[in-house]
Every structure is written in C-alpha cells, then in structure tokens.
C-alpha cells in the first residue's frame, strides 16, 4: 500500500469529511469534489440495485441533489462520510426499484462475488476494525443465512424477491434471514 | 422466541428494506411511535454500513456531473428568477388595471368566486404530554402548512414535519425552521396525502433533515388532521 495522499485512509476520509461539511455551507467547489471522490462508488451502488445504466444515472443525479440539500445534516463524529453517502444512494436506488416494479433477477450466488479486495480510496475510508468485526460475524453464519443477508444488502431486494431468486417458499426465506439476523446481532453485541 | 429478539429483527428488516406492502408500512409507522425501535433501526444501519466496501465501483457517464452541477446552480438562481417573474407579472397587472380603470366608466369586471377547497387543521400534541399543543392549519389552495410554533429541539438538530397516511410510509413535509409561526410549503406531489384523518408527526432530525427520507430521530409530537 502506498502512502500517497489518495490511498492514505485517514487522509482520504478527512478530506471527504471536510468537503462534505463545506458542501453543507453551500460551497459548490467542495460539492464538486465530493462528487469526484465518491461518484464511482455511489454509481456502483445505483447500478447494482437498479440493474440498468440509464435508471442508475437518473437515480445518481437525484442522490447528489439530495446530498447538496442535506449535507448540512451530516455529523462528522457519528457516521463515516462514505457510509452516509452510500446509505442515501442505496435508499434512493431501492425507492426507484420499488416504484418501477423492477424485478431484475440475478442469481443469489452473485453476492459472493462482490467482495473487492483492491485498495480503493473510498473503501479504505471505512473503519477497518468495524469492517473486520462485521465480516467475522457474517462468516459465523450458515451459508444460506449469510448469502441471503448479503444479497438483501447489496441488491436492495425484499423477502419475496430473495425467495423467488432461489426458489424457496417465502416463509422459509424469512426464517433463514431472521435467524441469521438474530445471530448476527448477538455476535456484534458480544464483540 | 423472546420478544426482545423479535424486536431486534424487525428493526434489521427495516434497515435492510426486506419488507413490502402493509408489513413495511406497519414497521415504518412503528418507527414513529416507538423511539427505541427507531434507535434500533439506526443501530442496524450503522452496523451494516461497513459493507459499503463490497459494492464494486463503476464510472457514470461524463455528462452526469455537468447535469448535477447545473441543477445545483439552478437551486439558488431559480428562486430569484421566480421572484423576479412574480414582480414583473404584478407590475404588468397593475399597469393593465390602471389602464382598464382609466378607460372604463363603470366596472364590467365581475369576480367569479371559485368554491375554495376546505382547509385542514390539527392540534399537535407533545408525545411526552408536557407543554402546550401546537395548532396546524393547511390551506389546500396555496399548499401551505402553518404551525403556531415548533417543539423545542436540542442544539444542532431540527424539527421535521411528517404526514402518515392510513396505509403508507411516513412522508416528509418539510423542516420547521426559524421562529414564531412556521410555514411549510408542501411539495406538489405530497399535497394529495393531506386529507381528513391522516396523522401529522414531528421528529427530531440532524440539521438538514432526515438523511434517509424516513424519520430517524424520536417523534416528539403528533396530531390528526381534520376538515373544517
């Protein structure tokens, strides 16, 4: 790992935090930098959940307008800037998906291919310790529980979509996920 | 299964967005009614947030940045333009009216009264039962909601007004900022939600309002809209 500014996690995170706070003061140059630092990640989220490029770009547009209006509410002490932005993108993309009745079905196995180990600037802005703990707890779940929870998170899909994708009854899917979430909670609380 | 564990999982289901239809609407209403549940949902959002690293990056088209920056420019300019347009229109009306008056000996302009849509009012009561209720009035003609005041919120927080329909998730109507009578211009696509019997709620949110589009902080006051 290099120690250059863009790849230094703490520096990258501090930079994004500063730009986001300045965006809250209606600083357009700062907002443009927030876009340049984060649009690849947020577009990746929109594309994954919407499943089509044009819709994902429209959603991305709405996401950044919301970021512009809501940046004043970002609390640097509480949330990591990229998590805050990603939550907005995920929710907006899910809204689009639900509103358009899209059922772009992908195989549940896709969730396993997501983990990207390259050191991407935005990724390294996350608290490594928190990420390690979460992964350790997810790894402790049964495969089917973990796959379902990961797919729900990354693809923004509901119980019924999860059940359809791997052709199990809705009740079965709900009980896998609920059991998995309970175990996840106990594990995270114990850590 | 102990009820406490059930509770946790329902909060996770909201955070993940697993629920649909009535189940989802009920869970979202629960977020408004139960501060502990809302806090649990926030806990799950934070707990899962590190997974963000797992989404692959992808480059949007180059023109998206320009579109966004243009929209943001418009955000401020548009209001100034609107006011200028209103001023110009008013001035033009005045000139026309003066000209008409000058030309006509007797008035031939008859005012046609449209039946005004009925106003809606609500008494918004503090959730903790302490303090006075706030009066809310909604004028369907102007799309403006007025509140006689706003609940006190901690520093660096803002009160956000929500409408909760009978079978839908809560929708934001806007932030209660400033002093004295608070005026909220209800967005056009939200006006249809305001009708007799729906619930208004005020939650405490980070500055700028809820980042998720749903209430994230405690609900400090609620009331029911009634036609007058």
Image (cartoon, rainbow, N blue to C red):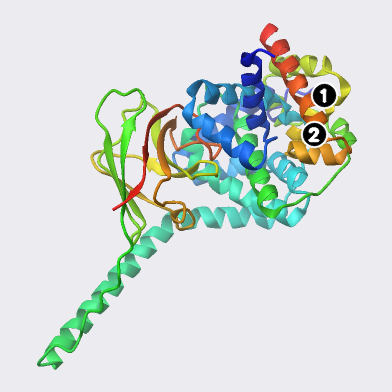
Q: Give residue A177's quadrant in the image.
A: top right
Q: Residue at x 88, y 37 (%)?
A: A166
Q: Residue at x 58, y 32 (%)?
A: B27
In front: B38, or A80? B38
Q: Where in the figure is residue B211, as x and y percent of width and height?
A: 53, 36
Q: Give residue B66's quadrant in the image.
A: bottom right
**Label 1, label 2: how many angstroms apart (C-alpha)?**
10 Å
Q: Residue at x 71, y 30 (%)?
A: B52
Give the residue pinned by disc 2.
Answer: A151
Give the residue pinned by disc 1.
Answer: A145
* Label 2 CA crowd tier, 10 Å (few <14, some 14–19, many 20+): many
Q: Chain of mark 2?
A: A
**Mark 1 or mark 2, which is nearer to you?**
1
Look at the image and tell me in which quarter the N terminus of chain B lies.
top right
Point out the residue furthest to the left here: B105
Q: Where in the figure is residue B49, as x and y percent of width and height?
A: 67, 27
* Label 1 CA crowd tier, 10 Å (few <14, some 14–19, many 20+): many
In front: A188, or B32? B32
The number of numbered badges drawn on the structure is 2
Classify mark 1: helix, strand or loop: helix
The earlier-in-sequence mark between 1 and 2 is 1
Residue A116 in view (yes/no): no
Classify mark 2: helix, strand or loop: helix
Q: Chain of mark 1?
A: A
Above or below, B23 relative to B118: above
Q: Where in the figure is residue B226, as x and y percent of width and height?
A: 34, 48
């Amino acid at each position: 790992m290099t120690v250059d500014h863009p790849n230094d996690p703490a520096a990258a995170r501090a930079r994004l935090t500063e730009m986001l706070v300045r965006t809250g003061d209606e600083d357009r140059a700062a907002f443009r930098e927030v876009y340049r630092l984060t649009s690849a990640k947020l577009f990746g989220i929109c594309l994954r959940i919407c499943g089509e490029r044009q819709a994902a770009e429209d959603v991305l547009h709405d996401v950044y307008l919301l970021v512009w209006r809501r940046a004043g509410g970002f609390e640097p002490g509480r949330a990591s800037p990229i998590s805050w932005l990603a939550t907005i993108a995920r929710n907006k993309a899910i809204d689009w998906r639900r509103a358009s009745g899209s059922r772009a079905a992908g195989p549940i196995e896709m969730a396993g291919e997501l983990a990207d180990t390259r050191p991407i600037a935005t990724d390294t802005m996350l608290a490594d310790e928190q990420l390690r703990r979460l992964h350790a707890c997810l790894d402790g779940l049964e495969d089917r529980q973990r796959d379902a929870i990961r797919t729900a998170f990354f693809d923004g899909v509901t119980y019924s979509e999860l059940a359809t994708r791997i052709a199990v009854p809705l009740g079965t899917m709900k009980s896998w996920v609920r059991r998995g979430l309970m175990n996840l909670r106990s594990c995270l609380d114990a850590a | 299964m102990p009820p406490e564990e059930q509770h946790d999982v329902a909060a996770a289901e909201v955070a993940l967005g697993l629920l649909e239809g009535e189940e989802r609407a009920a869970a979202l209403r629960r977020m408004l009614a139960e501060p502990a549940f809302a806090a649990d949902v926030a806990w799950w959002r934070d707990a899962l947030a590190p997974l963000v690293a797992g989404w692959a990056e992808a480059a949007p088209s180059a023109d998206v940045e320009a579109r966004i920056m243009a929209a943001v420019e418009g955000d401020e300019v548009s209001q100034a333009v609107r006011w200028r347009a209103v001023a110009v229109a008013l001035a033009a009306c005045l000139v026309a009216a003066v000209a008409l008056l000058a030309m006509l000996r007797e008035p031939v302009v008859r005012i046609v009264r449209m039946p005004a849509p009925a106003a809606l009012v609500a008494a918004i009561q503090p959730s903790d039962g302490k303090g006075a209720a706030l009066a809310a009035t909604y004028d369907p003609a102007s799309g403006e909601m007025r509140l006689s005041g706003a609940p006190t919120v901690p520093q660096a927080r803002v009160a956000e007004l929500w409408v909760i329909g009978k079978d839908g998730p809560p929708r934001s109507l806007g932030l209660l900022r400033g002093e004295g009578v608070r005026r909220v211009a209800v967005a056009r696509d939200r006006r249809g939600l305001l009708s007799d019997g729906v619930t208004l709620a005020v939650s405490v949110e980070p500055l700028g309002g809820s980042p998720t589009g749903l209430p994230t902080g405690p609900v400090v006051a609620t009331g029911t809209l009634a036609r007058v």
